[in-house]
Amino acid sequence: MKKIKFPTAHTILIGIALFVAILTWCIPAGKYDSLKYNSEDNSFEISSTKKDYKLTATQESLNDLGVQIPLEKFTSGAIYKPINIPNTYTKVDSNPQGFAEFIQAPIKGIIEASDIIFLVLIIGGLIGIMNHSGAFDAGIAGLAKTLNGREYILIIVVTTLIAIGGTTFGLSEETMAFYPILIPVFLAAKYDAMVGLASIFIGSAVGCLFSVTNPFATIIASDAAGISWTTGMTGRAIMLLLCLLVCILYILQYAKKVKKDPSKSLIYDQREEMNKAFGLKTSNQLKLTWRLKFILMVFSLSFLVMIIGVSFLDWWFVEMTSTFLLAAIVIGFVGRINEREFVDAFAKGAGDLLSVAFIIGIARGVTILMNDGLISDTVLYYASTATEGMNKGIFANLLMLIYSGLAFFIPSQSGMAVLTMPIMSPLADTVGVGREVVVNAYLYGLGLFYFINPTSMILAALSLVKIGYNKWLKFVWPLLLILTIFIMLSLTFSVYF
């Protein structure tokens, strides 16, 4: 009997899209009124189920609407997306998504996610040029020789640096660039690809989970809750250090076991496939010449420039993508790659990541189905009513679990913040806790589910590394359980002490 294989990421997402389409036939449609600041005429644009209208942008207007957020959060640009207005939920005529909408959703998702998709494809092209130049193989071979006997340093450094990026500026989608680069390094260090995947993805996940200065999560959510983003920062920083240590020790324990006995690897049956896809090919023939060193320097600088641009210069996908395209062109000149070879290598590298691009688009299509089906606000409304008047400890932990559930439907950190925080944060007042508890519950709930959320980035990462979702779940569930217990204890402690 032929062994049944676990479905691919694409099939899993198509199944989720079908499930969401069915939900639009079962869940009542509803909407909150929304508010958006217009800087051109200093007004609030109110989108309502009854009639759209404008109000003068004053604190009094916000108070009349029940939006307890300081006016300067809007006028300064801190809150630039439409936010839901509390106590305005209204049932509306349903708009169930049929077969045509289900088929169109992935296409709409690809179009809507074109910015990140082009980033992924251009990075793929850059990787193709790097592979063609031979700089990767020579550089990785040199690094493996340098780390001989101290390969564990690689896990500690990669996980920590990416966690710092996650907690400071929300490094998540950008990590797609690191998998094809770093997985060969981990294989050369005699680990398996799961160790490389874990170091990168868990580093990003735990950093975003305990966001300290992340503007796309902590700052936006705190602004939308009407509190300073520094409120509760100390507790998040302490939890970041503790849980990052737990994550690194967890990865090190698995890595040590795999290095000692490769058959203990969760992906041992894929070792030949991994070596073919990511293993060194020409390292024995290539020496790390000055030209290859310069190519590696240009390559590394492109990522440093990206991080600086995102952190300090308000860069986003267009600027990041342009940086990697320029790096590929410079490397082509330095490596003396002729025009035809450059185009072929770039196209092949981009083609290798085309599957990942489709996954990102299909995942976005799931969100489009839900929004078009008018069930997002309904899910939010019933989630918010479930916590009113509860015991403080139960409230904090249940709210975290609710946010984990909402993350399936709204995987975006900033999107979740602006849509839910004006609705959820006043609930803190009803149970006698600070609103920073709601912000933390939002961060922790979204962050914990991020480890396994099929509508977020994990399936794209798994597709890049060629590891099945079932094997990732088997690897990560004990760590996820440990982190969940830590966080529930932390939330309980924060409301009583």
Image (spheres, grey):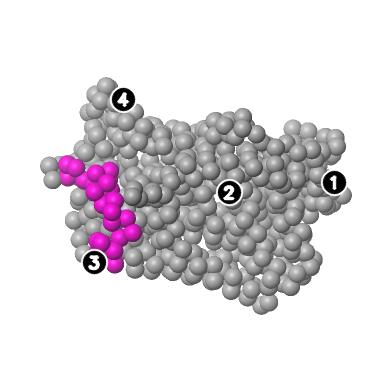
Q: Which residues are magenta?
A: 256-283
- Residue extending farthest to the bottom is 497
Q: Neighbour class for label 3 at 10 Å: few (<14), some, many (≥20)?
A: few
- Alpha carbon of mark 3 to alpha carbon of mark 1: how far? 65 Å
Magenta run includes residue 474: no
- Residue at 24% in and 34% down: 132
Magenta run includes residue 276: yes
Figure quadrant of the C terminus: bottom right
Q: Nearer the viewer, mark 2 or mark 4?
A: 2
- Residue at 50% in and 67% down: 481
Q: Considering only vertical position in the picture, is 479 above or below 331? A: below
Q: Which mark identifies residue 260?
A: 3
- Alpha carbon of mark 2 to alpha carbon of mark 3: how far? 38 Å
What residue did someone put label 2 on?
A: 411
What residue did someone put label 1 on?
A: 61
| Residue type indicated by callout 1 | Ser
- Alpha carbon of mark 4 to alpha carbon of mark 3: how far? 42 Å
N-term mark: 3 or 1:
1
Residue 227: which quarter of the image? bottom right
What residue did someone put label 4 on?
A: 343
| Residue type indicated by callout 4 | Val
| Residue type indicated by callout 2 | Pro
Residue 353: which quarter of the image? top left
Q: In the rendering, at what x and y percent does residue 64 appear? A: 87, 49
